[in-house]
Image (cartoon, helix red, strand yellow):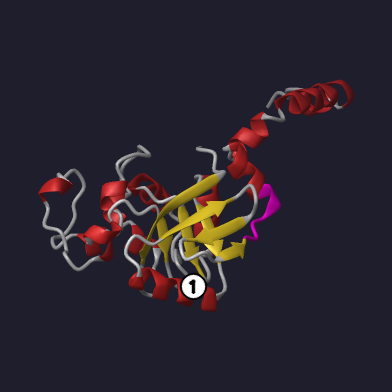
Amino acid sequence: MRAFMTHRGLVAPMEGENVNTDAILPKQFMKSIERTGFGEHLFDSQRYLDYGKPGVDCTLRPLNPRFVLNLPRYHGASVLLAQRNFGCGSSREHAPWALDQFGFRVLLAPSFGEIFANNCFRNGLLPLALEENIVHDLFQEVHGTPGYWIEVDLLERRLTTCSGRILPLSVDAERRQRLLRGSDEIDATLELRETIKRHEAWRRQYRPWLFEKHAG
């Protein structure tokens, strides 16, 4: 996955608590065995006026002119400001894939669905849980300031807004290191392959019965 050190991006506000993973990426788009092509279906039932079907050219579909991500002022947004319990519901990993492929790198909310947040970290997205009053203030600022941006510095553990506000960030140390390196759990395991090989050699030498084949 892509490494994450610093990111500065336009903020888009997503209203509503308890936005679940089926709203983020509706179930009919989860049939693909590939990990690509999900971004155009992010929030599909809200972005478009018709019912979305796999394989349909989305450039020909009617857009909902009132949906936040369709508003010109939020085009190119890479930071999503959300409300409480964002990403609740099923454990589908497709939801973070869709957010990432649409262009988001940072998610801000008072809280996230636990499995959803884990999946975000595994896929190079940074979900940051902020105090509810801070999120409320950010919503007010974003709505009142066209072009509102924030910068996240994971190296220095701080968030800076275009209004000059600086907030300290609290991110789990292990997850932070993986994001900084751009490595997931598989990469972390592969980094230990020599240690694993030595351990397996030790087991074969001192516990050979574990590797004996028994007839019948």
Q: Residue 191, position in %: x, y? A: 68, 30
Q: Residue furthest right?
A: 206
Query: Could one spot residue 160 in this view of the protein?
Result: yes
Magenta-drawn segment: 169-174
Left or right: 101 with respect to 90?
A: left
Residue in view at x 35 percent, y 54 percent: 77
Residue in view at x 50 percent, y 54 percent: 151
Query: Could one spot residue 84 in this view of the protein?
Result: no
Figure check: 138 above or below 211: below
**Residue 199 location, quadrant:** top right
As shown in the figure, which amino acid type bears the numbered disc 1?
Answer: Val
Residue in view at x 36 percent, y 47 percent: 103
In magenta stretch: residue 185: no
**Residue 21 location, quadrant:** bottom left
Left or right: 178 with respect to 214?
A: left
Q: Image quadrant for the C terminus?
A: top right
Figure check: 127 above or below 188: below
Figure check: 206 above or below 27: above
Q: Nearer the viewer, residue 73 or 100?
A: 73
Q: Residue 185, position in %: x, y? A: 61, 40
Residue in view at x 38 percent, y 39 percent: 35
The residue tagged 1 is: 135
Q: Residue 165, position in %: x, y? A: 54, 66
